[in-house]
Amino acid sequence: MYLSELSDYVLAPIGTGSGLNRFNFTISKGDAYSIKSDSGDDARLLLKALATLIYPTRGTYLFYGEKLDFTDYRKLLFCKREIGYIALDSAMISNRTIRENLLFMRHYFENSMDISLDEQTKKLCRDFGIYDKLDTHASKLDRMDLRVAIAIRELTKRPKLLIVERPEDLVSHSKRGLFLKILNDMIIAKIPMVLLSYSEDLIRELETKKITIENGKFTTI
């Protein structure tokens, strides 16, 4: 069984993109796709669609064999929990602390407010230098610390599918090696991944397969 399977999928364009017309795509355990596109908007469109942030105008999305129902966002929550989405436009709840943001999904799904950060999350916060900012509201963080916090939030979901936009720009230069190691470890663990990166070195190190998008035409290699 494929982890994700998009069939006869049509996505309306965003920005200056062409959109994607009637394509098929599957991703399985161990796949690490990079995206090469003549349109940054079309590449981001695919990332958002895989993360169920953009709905198709036509087609079927199966996640672990279950057909997704886009008529009610609440019916997508089960798969959003399993998909990590780390992108430059990702956000946190601005009037909540970083700690509250990191725990928000666990509070919802475990139906309890008596939950604290686990040791893995604490370690990542220390390693990436934001542990002393856990009780700061998201709106008060600088852009780089906020991106780090978002990355940690998505990584500690223990996602079954990870989607990452421009990993080379998500963390400071001094922490890129650490972030790259985490991504490599996830690939070794066969967690499927879709990456949009403009770093050829990073792509060569991480990818196992390629997606190309040209004039709205979708192909895989």
Image: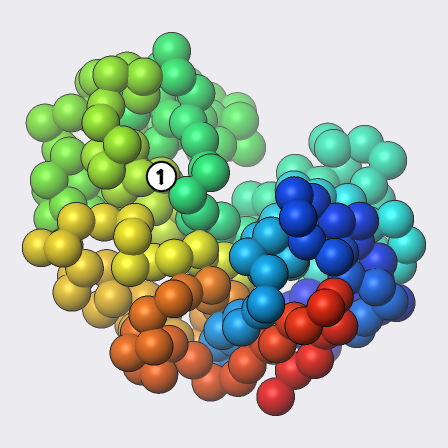
Give the side of residue 103 with respect to residue 58, left or right: left
For the C terminus, the image quarter is: bottom right
**Within 10 Å of the Cα at label 1, are there few (<14), some (14-19), or many (20+) other Cα atoms?**
many
Q: In the image, what residue occupies the spot 68% across and 53% down?
A: 17
Residue 160 visible somewhere in the drawing: no
Query: What is the three-letter code of the residue carrying label 1?
Result: Ile
Residue 171 on image: x %, y %: 23, 49
The correct choice, above or below, for 99 with respect to 44 in the image is above
Residue 176 on image: x %, y %: 18, 59
The correct choice, above or below, for 73 with respect to 5 in the image is above
Q: In the image, what residue occupies the spot 23% across and 23% down?
A: 141
The correct choice, above or below, for 96 with respect to 83 in the image is above
Give the side of residue 125 with respect to residue 212, left or right: left
Residue 94 visible somewhere in the drawing: yes
- Identify the secondary structure beneath mark 1: helix
For the N terminus, the image quarter is: bottom right
Q: Quadrant of residue 61?
A: bottom right
Give the labeled residue for mark 1: 150
Residue 174 on image: x %, y %: 9, 55
Q: In the image, what residue occupies the spot 10% across and 40% down?
A: 129
Please identify the residue farthest to the bottom as the structure is shown: 221
Q: How many marks?
A: 1
Give the side of residue 184 with respect to residue 219, left or right: left
Q: Quadrant of residue 134?
A: top left
Q: In the image, what residue occupies the spot 38% across and 57% down?
A: 166
Between 75 and 175, the one nearer to me in the picture = 175
Please identify the residue farthest to the top as the structure is shown: 95
Between 124 and 119, the one nearer to me in the picture = 124
Between 15 and 103, the one nearer to me in the picture = 15
Tell me the colour scheme of the image.
rainbow
Residue 210 on image: x %, y %: 55, 81
